[in-house]
Image: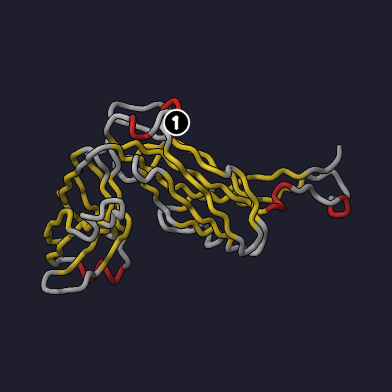
Amino acid sequence: MNAFRCTAALLAVALAAMPAAAELLVAPTRVVLTPDARSAELVLVNKGSEAAAFRLAIENRRMRIDGGLEAAPDPRPGEQFAADKLRFSPRQLVLEPGARQVVRIMATGADGLGAASLAPGEYRSHLRLMSAPISAGRSLDDAARPADNSLSIELIAIRSITIPVILRVGKLDSQVTVDTAALSGPGGDQLVVRLSRQGSRSTYGDIALTVEGETDPAWLVRGVAVYTPNTERDVILPLPAEIKARLTGRTVRVTYISTDSAEPALLGTLLASLSATL
């Protein structure tokens, strides 16, 4: 039997605003479309030192109460996905080191109808970008093959980023409250903030922790979303030791401030707040 190579894929999912292992830069990291603004562009930049192949696909995902995302093969009550209402191009590409590519995303509608014909509401799916070095698909050179019949295994990292793509139709609104904030986890090294959302639109913003009597936040967490149809989310904030020591036993104001650029009237406004003694 000839020696052969088995390539194992290691999946690494990078979250909002984080490039995959600092090799794939994507901007923006969140897309919101409307019937009036039916298209958007993503810019991909290969920051690595090797040419990489990319494959793009639309997936439906739901948010768990802990903020994690999971596959949603079938819609549950209240879930409205956008997968059949979106077009994007290209679907596959190769980028040399330092090169960039624009990916165009357009809202159409179910069965080819225009986005404006959809029932009012928020529709959401996720664009997944998977990348791997071009060398991942190359076979071993004969000269590099083991002399015996041993198995040679090479691990190739397949990096993955998911970008939420949201289609908003009609006049939508939302209300959110900060219900509780308490230290949790082993040794109380994380803060759990419970957000409650009502209305027809997701919320998106930054959470700031400010000690009573101080002006500047002691800790800031960016890009916290509560997606429809979820009405609750536990935002789990790991705290560095010095931040935990600064907050423990103190009264802390927890604020949730909108950074949703698709809602200019709300951008930078206070969505909800709570004062709690930690």
Q: Position of residue 184 (x, y in %)?
A: 25, 54
Q: Quadrant of residue 79?
A: top left
| Side of 277 relative to 224 (left or right) | left
Instruction: Give the labeled residue for mark 1.
Output: 84
Q: Residues within 10 Å of mark 1 (few under 14, many from 20)?
A: some
Counting every numbered tag in the picture gives 1
Q: Point out the image quarter for the N terminus.
A: top right
Which residue corresponds to the image point at 86% horizontal and 40% vertical from the top-left? Answer: 2
Residue 264: percent from left, percent from top: 25, 55
Residue 68 seen in render: no
Quadrant housing the C terminus: bottom left
**Residue at the location (65% across, 45% down)?**
8
Residue 115 visible in the displayed image = yes
Residue at 34% from the left image edge and 43% from the top image edge: 36
Q: Depth check: give the residue in front, 269 or 146.
A: 269
- Expressed as whole percent of the image width and height from the top left, the position of residue 258 reads 24, 56
Q: Is residue 89 left or right of residue 109?
A: right
Which residue is located at x 24 percent, y 70 percent?
218
Q: Secondary structure at mark 1?
A: helix
Between 16 and 85, the residue placed more toward the observer is 85
Viewer-side residue, 104 vs 91: 104
Its colouring scheme is secondary structure
Left or right: 75 in relation to 150: left
Task: Establish if 36 lies above or below 121.
Answer: below
Q: Quadrant of residue 246?
A: bottom left
Three-letter amino acid code at the position of disc 1: Asp
Which percent across, then down, holds residue 156? 65, 51
